[in-house]
Image (cartoon, helix red, strand yellow):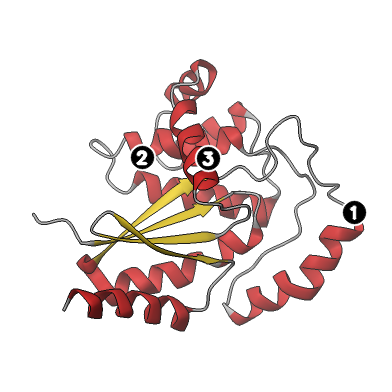
Amino acid sequence: MTQPRIALDVFSDYVCPFCYLEMPELDALAERFGGKVTIRWRAFELRPAPEPTLDPDGDYLHDIWGRAVYPMAAERGMTLRLPRIQPRSRLAHEAAAWAEAQAADHPGAAGAMRRALFRGFFEESMDLADPQVLARLAETLALDGSALQRALAQGDHRQAVMADQRTARDLGIQGVPALRFSLDGEHAGVLEGAQPRRQLFLATQRLLDALG
């Protein structure tokens, strides 16, 4: 089967509400353009150690949620709640990479894990930094929680996560979501921030038009 000539790399973090809010727009893009575009989710840890995490009850979070997150969630028909905690997200990214590696035996595992991580954090304040919590989440998706815990302890997917981070740095990406388009493997531009559906459609259609 011929691979689509257009690829969209979505750099995101599981503690970023705007990344979660972009999911329905990307779902619509996948439905609209079918097999013409490959969408690949890439890891981007906003606050890697030793950088301090945000204060879950600080003025910054309350302000940005009041001004931007809640209004956008209402526009996109989503339910988000300001999490009570602000954990590091490295292990969540490793868990998502592990789920992707289960694709042969569990088709759709990567997408299910990605949605569960976002939903768990932004609807239930799930601790993304706790391996046991992540293992229990995997089990709710009919995946092997013990195997995930072992993979996290051994760092089986850490290098893949770090490779994504280096790619983002090389592209000059400093915040997420960041949407990088490629055409036949060549860089074709980056859209930064949560994009409306129309903008995603226009950017994709321009590239398709360029193919002739």
In front: mark 3 or mark 2?
A: 3
Mark with earlier residue (1, 2): 1
143 to the left or right of 93: left
Q: In the figure, 154 relative to 89: above or below?
A: above
Give me the disc on residue 58.
1
Disc 3 marks which residue? 165
Q: Is residue 40 visible?
A: yes
Q: Residue 39: horizontal and vertical position, in percent?
A: 35, 58
Question: In what element is the residue under mark 1?
Answer: loop
| Label 3 element class | helix
- Depth check: 196 or 175 in front? 175
Q: CA distance from mark 1 to mark 3?
A: 27 Å
Which element type, helix, strand or loop, lies under badge 2? helix
Say what amino acid the circle numbered 2 marks: Glu
Pinpoint residue 37: horizontal percent, then vertical percent: 27, 65
Mark 2 lies on residue: 100
Q: Position of residue 61 (x, y in %)?
A: 82, 59
Disc 1 crowd, CA 10 A, few/some/many (<14, 14-19, 20+): few
N-terminal-most mark, 1 or 3? 1
**Can you say whether 66 is above or below 2 in the image?**
below
Marks 1 and 2, Cα distance to the nearest angstrom?
35 Å
Identify the image quadrant of the C terminus. bottom left
- In which quadrant of the rendered image does the N terminus lie? bottom left
Q: Is residue 145 visible?
A: no
Q: Amino acid at mark 1?
A: Gly
